[in-house]
Amino acid sequence: MYRLALLAFSMMVTTLLARQPNVIIIFTDDQGSIDMNIYGAKDLETPNMDSLARRGTRFTQFYAAAPICSPSRVGLMTGRTPQHGGLSVNVGLTAVGMPSEQVTIAEELKKAGYVTAHIGKWHLGNSKQTIPNGQGFDYSFGHYVGCIDNYSHFFYWRGPNKHDLWRNGKEVFYNGEFFPDLMVKEASEFIDKNKAKPFFIYFAMNTPHYPYQGSPKWLEHYKDLEYPRNLYAAFLSTIDERIGQLLKKVDDSGLTKDTIVIFQSDHGASAEVSAHGGGGYSGEYRGAKFSLYEGGLRVPAIISWPGNIPENAVRGQMATGCDWYPTILELCKLPAMQHRIDGKSLLPVIKSTDAPSAHSSFNWKSGNAKAVREKDWKLVVTGKKNELYNIPDDPGEKNNQAGQNPEVVTRLIKVSQDYWKSIPVKK
């Protein structure tokens, strides 16, 4: 009896002292829908990103919360669509940003005892209340606006030219140092200081967003690719190496089995003039950044936690960037949030290929365009034109079936209208 009581007490203590998992979110910027070897790219070298998929679960129908930068990050940080999260456009130099009353995943984890860090791009606000330190992050290093030159750390795509590099709200200068290298250094130091307790790192890369600034090694490697694919590919492989350095730091710290790593691109690849008109690739998917077609919304997405979730697994259920928030809380065995969000926990899907999608439907809006996905159907509304596609049969969205299926169009228009009616109208 004594031995049984002692064993029970020992098990109880072990449970109480069991470490909550660390969480690292690696969020790339403007990475094309299939721009990884494991997603089908034949002309790229992405061994480190691919390694995450081999020791985790990757999604093949994963959607960004929006086809542009700031709103997509709202979905990730709040678990809400950008419209529910109060920010549906990109934040500029003077914009207020995401409302500070939004509850971020960093705030939830900090409340649970996590030490939290933002490292990299923010793009959700520049005021004291809306910078990372005002939104749940104990530590922040990076830039606040949409992109920077990786060596001067200036934002200069739309004037005025502005130096944009900050640590905990104070401007810092590292002129000439490659920003992705600075990110790895900052993350590594944060891990060293906080590895004895659970931590959350939002590793938000501003790459392969323009300017394409790949290393000489990779520019030489891809010299025979057509322009601008050669520049994009060199930059993507350059950042893949930095992702590898971050993952090696986790491994070398003995934290691999204690750390959930999530990987996602914020939306599809850019075809902007500043991106040399392209370089990223969406394969058969139509559209690119800014678009509500698959090439603008469908992104690579992976979750890895060796020993705790399936490894080298593939899931074809529809999922979204809003879903990481509740998924993280459930994996960390933390209480569900008390306010309304649009995300759903992906844990049932991660556990089983047979689980239904967490969403009966999901809605997007960009400018005046709207889209809604329900099971196999996707409706895209641009102006007065309705476009209906059966995504499994027609992932390239080439065959508009609105005329043949008016009842489906009518139903999805109502689903869309009902959802947007639930968004408070700003006065």
Image (tube, rainbow, N blue to C red):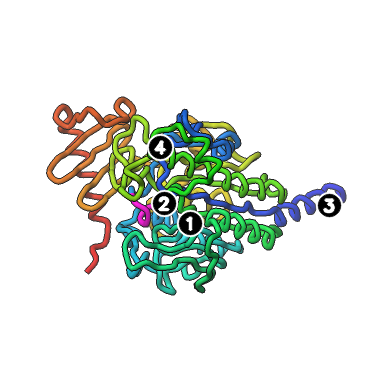
Residue at horizontal 49 percent and vertical 34 percent from the top: 44
Q: Nearer the viewer, residue 253 or 199?
A: 253
Q: Which residue is mark 2?
A: 211
Q: Which residue is mark 4?
A: 229
Q: Mark 3 and mark 1 in contact (Cβ < 8 Å)?
A: no
Magenta region, residue range: 68-72
Dot 3: element: helix
Instruction: Report the side of 228 relative to 26 (left or right).
Output: left
Image depth: mark 1 or mark 3 in front: 1
Residue 69 part of the magenta-drawn span: yes
Instruction: Report the side of 420 relative to 306 (left or right).
Output: left
Q: Which residue is mark 1?
A: 150
Q: Residue 425: x and y, percent?
A: 23, 63
Image depth: mark 3 or mark 2 in front: 2
- Whether residue 283 is visible, yes or no, is yes
Tell me the distance, in whole angstroms, between the alpha carbons under discs 2 and 4. 13 Å
Tell me the distance, in whole angstroms, between the alpha carbons under discs 1 and 3. 58 Å
Nearer the N terminus, badge 1 or badge 3? Answer: 3
Residue 6 image label = 3
The relative height of residue 271 versus residue 406 in the rendered view (above or below) is below
Residue 128 part of the magenta-drawn span: no
Type of amino acid at the residue the image marks with label 3: Leu
Q: Nearer the viewer, residue 182 or 225?
A: 225
Nearer the N terminus, badge 2 or badge 4? Answer: 2
Dot 4: element: helix
